[in-house]
Amino acid sequence: MNRTTLSLIAGATALAAVTGFAAVSAPDPEAAGQRTGAAATLPVERTGLLCPRPSTSDLAETTYTSFTPVTEGADGKGTAVLRSAAQQSAPDENENENEDAEGEDEKDGETTEKGDKDAAKDDKADRPVLQLKEPGKPVSAEADGADAPALVGTADGRFASGWTAQQTTEVAAGTGRGLQGVACSAADTQFWFPGASTDDSRTDYIHLTNPDDSAAVVDIELYGKDGELETTVGEGITVKPRSAEPVLLSTLTAEKQTDVTVHVVVRSGRVGAAVQALDDETGGDWLPASADPSGRLVMPGIPKDAKAVRLVAFTPGDADVDLRVRLAAPSGLITPAGNETLHLKGGMTAAFDLGELTRGEAGSLVLTAPDGSVPVVAAVRVLRGEEGKQESAFIPAARPIETRATALDNTAKGTTLSVTAPEGGAEIKVTASAGTEGGTPQTKTYSIKPGTTQDIEAPVPAGLKGGYALTVETRSGGPVYASRTLASTEGGVPYFTVQPLPDDRGMVAVPDASEDLSVLQR
C-alpha cells in the first residue's frame, strides 16, 4: 500500500473520530463529476447521532423525529436507526450473577419462564425506536413519562448524508414545565456550556451519552464569576459502554452560583453532551454546546417578543477582553444603547442583562473581540411572557451553515425560522419536506441582506399531516446562521424552545488519490 492511500484512509479515520462515525470512501472521478486531480465533494457514507434522556418528569410527553434529506450522489442502499441507549447499556454485575443462578432451572432443552422473559427483553432491546424508510420523509415516535430513553443511532448509505434527529418534550407542570427541545448531536471529546447554574432555583443536569463498546472517562470543570469552582467528584467520571449518565451540577460543588460555564473534557473515548436547565419559576429547556471558542460569535434568532435577554460569556485562559456587542436586526447591524462593549476577565464567567433587546423585531446577537485575538464562548438565556407566566430558552453561539442544515418536528403554526447573514448578503433555499403522515414537499428561495436577521415565512408542505422538516441550503454569499423556534400557549404561559441549526456535515471534500500518487512516487 502506498503512502497516498494511507494518508487518505488516515484522513477519513480522523473525520470519523471527530464527527461521530462520519466516513467516506475514495472518490470515483467520473461518478463525482470531477476531473482527475481535483477534490471531489461526496456524501458521507456513515454517521452517528446521540439523543439525551428527555425528562425525569412523569408528566413529560416526548416526540422523537428522524429525517434525512434527499442527497444527489448518495448510495442507493442503507439504514438509519435510533435505539434506546438504556436497553443497550452494560448489565449490572449482580444482575448477571442472579441470571446465572436462575438459568440453572433449564432442563432437557426447555426454556424456563425466566428464559422467556430474558428472550423478550433481548428482543425489545433490539427493536429500533425510530427507523427511516426513505430519504425526504421524516418519521416520529412518542414516549410518555420519565421512562423515555436516551437514544444511540447510526445511519449509512443513502441515509447518512444530512441525517438529523430531534426530541421535543412538553412538561405540563413542575420544575422545568414548558417546551423543551434539543437536536441530537454527534459524539465528541470537548464541550463548552456557558449559561448553566448551580443556584438553588435551578436544577441543571449535564447529560453524557456514550455510543461505543468501551467506557468513556470524563472530567467536568465549572467556572463561576471568580474563576474555577472547587469540585468534589468532577474528575474521572465513568460513562459505561452504550449508556447515558445524567450528572446534577449542584452535586459537583458546594458553591451556589447563578451563572456558570461548564467545560466537559473526555479523557478516553467520546460522548455526546448537553445541559438540561430546569427552573422553579420560569420553566426550562436544553442548553446545547456553544461553538468552539472564537473571537467572533453569533447567537441567531432571539425571539422578537423576548421580555429579557441575559448574556453569559467566558474566555478560557488569563487574557481579559472587551467584547463589541451588536444586534443584527431586520434593518442591519445596530449597537444596543448602554451595552456597546462588555468586559470579560480571563477565566471568569460574566453575565450581562440586556433587557428587551429585540424590541419587537427579529434579532441575532453578534459579539466580536478586537482583531479576534481572544477566544470566547457564549450563550443567551431568553424569557418570554409576563411576570408569573414566563418561560425560558437558551441560544448558544452557533456554527454557520456551510452547505445545509435541517430542523425537525415543525408544525404549520408555531414554527419560526430565523436566518441571519451578519457579514454579507446571502441567498438560501428552504425546503419543507413531506409530513410524517402525509403531504407534498415545497421549496422557496430567499435573499438575506447583509448584516440583517429575518424571520422568514417558511414553506409548509401541501396537504400537511403530522410534523415536517425544514432544510436550509446556502446558495451564495454568507456566512449564514439560523435557528428555529417552536411555540405554543398553555394556560396563558408561552411555551417555546429554540434550536440553532448547525451544518449537517453531510458532504465532505475528498482529494483525488491519483494526483498525490504522481507527486509521491519517485
Image (spheres, grey):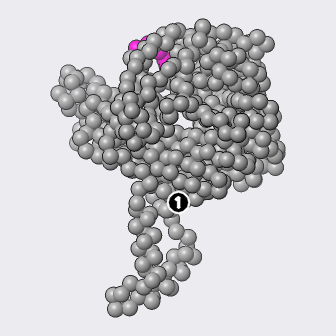
Whole-percent x and y of residue 404? 41, 27
Q: Is residue 120 left or right of residue 510?
A: right
Whole-percent x and y of residue 464? 41, 34
Residue drawn 38% across the image and 91% down it: 107
Q: Is residue 190 visible?
A: no
Is 465 located above or below residue 514 in the figure?
below
Name the quadrant of the C terminus.
top left
For label 1, the residue is 86
Label 1 packing within 10 angstroms: few (<14), some (14-19), many (20+): many
Is 402 located above or below residue 109 in the figure?
above
Name the quadrant of the N terminus.
top left
In this rendering, the count of numbered labels is 1
Q: What secondary structure is the magenta-colored segment mainly?
A: loop
In the image, farthest residue toward the left: 30
Q: Is residue 160 visible?
A: yes
The residue lying toward the viewer, choosing from 285 and 241, is 285
Is 77 located above or below residue 341 in the figure?
below
**What segment carries the magenta color?**
476-480
Q: Quadrant of residue 306?
A: top right
